Amino acid sequence: MLTSKRFTRKEVEELVNALQLPRIVRAANRITEDSRTALCMLLARLAYPNRLCDLALKFGWPVERVSRISTVVQGFIHDRWYHLLVWDPQRLTPECLARYARAI
């Protein structure tokens, strides 16, 4: 299994579980990949600086495969967890945010 420079294998596995990624990631053109490798592709793609051609060499697959799989994982994460990214003005008041900042 490949891992990102910033995550250990154990941490990648924990992310796969926490994000509730499917065991097998399937792109629309029937390209498939296991969830750990697919997440590593996305993490590597989001890390700066990485070009798709560099990632294709790193993973040993065509650029299209890296692009499609990482895009599918990104879409899955967005669709599954979008509700956590929506700003909640009822809970996230200026006073509450100041309290969080002091705690950190």
Image (tube, rainbow, N blue to C red):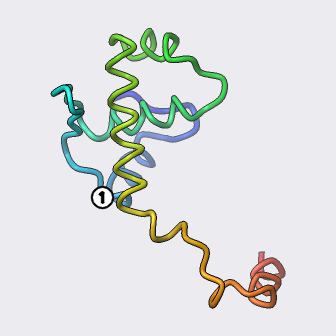
Which quadrant is home to the N terminus? Answer: top left
**Which residue sits furthest left?**
30
Q: Which residue is depicted at the point 34% across and 28% down?
A: 68
The kind of residue tagged 1 is Gln
The quadrant holding residue 98 is bottom right
For the point 45% across and 49% down, the residue is: 11
Residue 70 at what x, y percent from top left?
A: 39, 33
Viewed as shown, does residue 52 lie left or right of 92?
Answer: left
Q: Residue at x 50, y 37 (%)?
A: 43
Q: Secondary structure at mark 1?
A: loop
Please state which of residues 88 and 98 is positioned toward the viewer in this rendering: 88
Left or right of residue 53, residue 10 in this image: left
Q: Which residue is mark 1?
A: 20
7 in relation to 77, above or below: above
Residue 10 relative to residue 45: left or right: left
| Residue sitting at x 44%, y 32% | 3
Q: Position of residue 81 (x, y in %)?
A: 42, 63
Looking at the image, is 74 positioned above or below residue 60?
A: below
Q: Position of residue 36 (x, y in %)?
A: 32, 39
* Above or below, comparing residue 101 to residue 73 in the picture: below
The quarter of the picture where the C terminus appears is bottom right
Report crowding for label 1: few under 14, some 14 to 19, many 20 or more residues within 10 A (C-alpha): some
Tell me residue 53's x, y (percent). Answer: 49, 10
- In the displayed structure, 37 sits above or below 21; it is above
